[in-house]
Image (cartoon, rainbow, N blue to C red):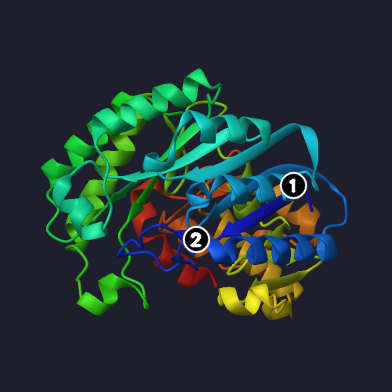
């Protein structure tokens, strides 16, 4: 394992669409949570060299100074490589000179900021807030403090959102000139405010039109579309997320985190109380070779470049086309074979789940 994910579940407010493990911020829970986090890491981490470290949530930037100091001590447990990538998720309202200095001291070198939108109607729906001027100012402050690898999240496909509203949103994101943009269409999940309110998804045809516009516009502006939902300037692809899409093993620590270690996939408890009491694991299972190959296909085809057939054979000792019914999908051009890679035809990328069902 050369990658680590750490989950911080505390939030100052709850977004309407979020189904990640999260609770409203309570200062009295921070210290016991950090103590449990340290114990879980001490028990599992094998002192390997770590290439990517990602702290997500929840809202890690909601932590108080004391909470950040506790987290900094935990981070020191990891043996970071010379060429590491260390991402920290932030809400824009939490970004201050003090926070940025603490993150630099912690060796964070990549920020991921949940903007989602600048449209007031969309923000109200999501139970979020952000203004373009404030974001512009906070990004400038971040760059003054040495952060030159920044991701911004953009959400689209909100009920009643118009094509014109998306275009205005995307224009502002591009103007901010981040190194990386992650895009997400709204999915209404169980146990969310959206589900309780019985919100409905946008018309699929409009959603596809929005996705195509985002893809073409960002490509025109010099962003590389390297994974279904992710766009980056050259050299700024997320190394950590590529670990997931390459089906590589990684540690997951904290309530609600998942991991993949020595052939076992596991998920931690979603209860912060249970986690604080030392009951970390919710479930764990050994992944068979056939399941591993299926995961390789499902995750690998999310990459725009696709799956390298020689690398697949080197990993599993079997040709991918012998393990999965690829040839009919190449014949009808749902899949493409180019330069030793199998990939989803860009024309069908938005309906890739239907293609995966035919494969697996």
Labels 1 and 2 touching (C-beta < 8 A) = no
Residue 84 image-quadrant placement: top right
- In the image, 221 versus 84, the foreground residue is 84
Q: Is residue 143 above or below residue 334?
A: above
State the residue at coordinates (19%, 62%). Answer: 202
- Mark 1, secondary structure of its residue: helix
Residue 268 image-quadrant placement: bottom right
- In the image, 353 versus 121, the foreground residue is 121
On screen, residue 295 versus residue 27, left or right, reads right
State the residue at coordinates (60%, 53%). Answer: 245
Q: Is residue 3 above or below residue 13?
A: above
State the residue at coordinates (35%, 55%). Answer: 350
For marks 1 and 2 on the same chain, the one whose residue lies earlier in the sequence? 2
Q: Residues within 10 Å of mark 2 (few under 14, many from 20)?
A: many
On screen, residue 97 versus residue 247, left or right, reads left
Residue 49 x/y as whole percent: 83, 43
- In the image, 151 versus 95, the foreground residue is 95
Residue 108 x/y as whole percent: 63, 35
For label 1, the residue is 73
- In the image, 40 versus 36, the foreground residue is 36
Residue 193 image-quadrant placement: bottom left
- Residue 258 visible in rendering: no
State the residue at coordinates (68%, 61%). Answer: 252
- Mark 2, secondary structure of its residue: strand
For label 2, the residue is 10
Give the number of marks: 2
- Residue 71 visible in rendering: yes
Location of the C terminus (image quadrant): bottom right
């Amino acid at each position: 394992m050369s990658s680590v994910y750490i989950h911080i579940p505390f939030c100052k407010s709850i977004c309407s669409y979020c189904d990640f493990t999260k609770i409203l911020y309570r200062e009295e829970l921070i210290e016991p949570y950090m103590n449990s986090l340290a114990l879980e890491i001490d028990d599992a981490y094998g002192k390997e060299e770590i290439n990517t470290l990602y702290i997500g949530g929840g809202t890690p930037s909601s932590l108080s100074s004391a909470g950040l100091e506790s987290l900094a001590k935990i981070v020191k447990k990891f043996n970071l490589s010379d060429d590491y990538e260390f991402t920290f998720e932030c809400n824009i309202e939490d970004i201050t000179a003090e926070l940025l200095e603490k993150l630099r001291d912690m060796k964070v070198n990549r920020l991921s900021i949940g903007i989602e939108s600048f449209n007031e109607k969309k923000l109200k729906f999501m139970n979020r807030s952000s203004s373009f001027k404030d974001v512009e100012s906070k990004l400038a402050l971040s760059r003054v403090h040495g952060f030159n690898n920044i991701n911004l999240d953009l959400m689209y496909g909100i009920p009643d959102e118009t094509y014109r509203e998306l275009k205005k949103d995307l224009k502002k994101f591009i103007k901010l000139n981040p190194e990386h943009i992650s895009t997400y269409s709204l999915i209404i999940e169980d146990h969310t405010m959206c589900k309780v309110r019985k919100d409905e998804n946008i018309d699929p045809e409009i959603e596809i039109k929005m996705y195509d516009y985002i893809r073409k516009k960002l490509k025109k502006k010099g962003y590389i579309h390297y994974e279904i939902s992710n766009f980056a300037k050259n050299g700024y692809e997320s190394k950590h997320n590529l670990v997931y899409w390459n089906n590589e093993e990684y540690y997951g620590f904290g309530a609600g985190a998942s991991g993949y270690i020595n052939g076992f996939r596991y998920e931690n408890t979603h209860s912060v109380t249970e986690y604080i009491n030392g009951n970390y694991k919710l479930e764990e299972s050994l992944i068979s070779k056939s399941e591993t190959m299926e995961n390789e296909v499902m995750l690998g085809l999310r990459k725009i470049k696709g799956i390298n057939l020689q690398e697949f054979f080197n990993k599993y000792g079997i040709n991918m086309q012998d393990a999965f019914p690829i040839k009919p999908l190449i014949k009808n051009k749902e899949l493409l074979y180019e330069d030793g890679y199998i990939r989803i035809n860009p024309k069908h990328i938005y309906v890739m789940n239907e293609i995966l069902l035919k494969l697996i």
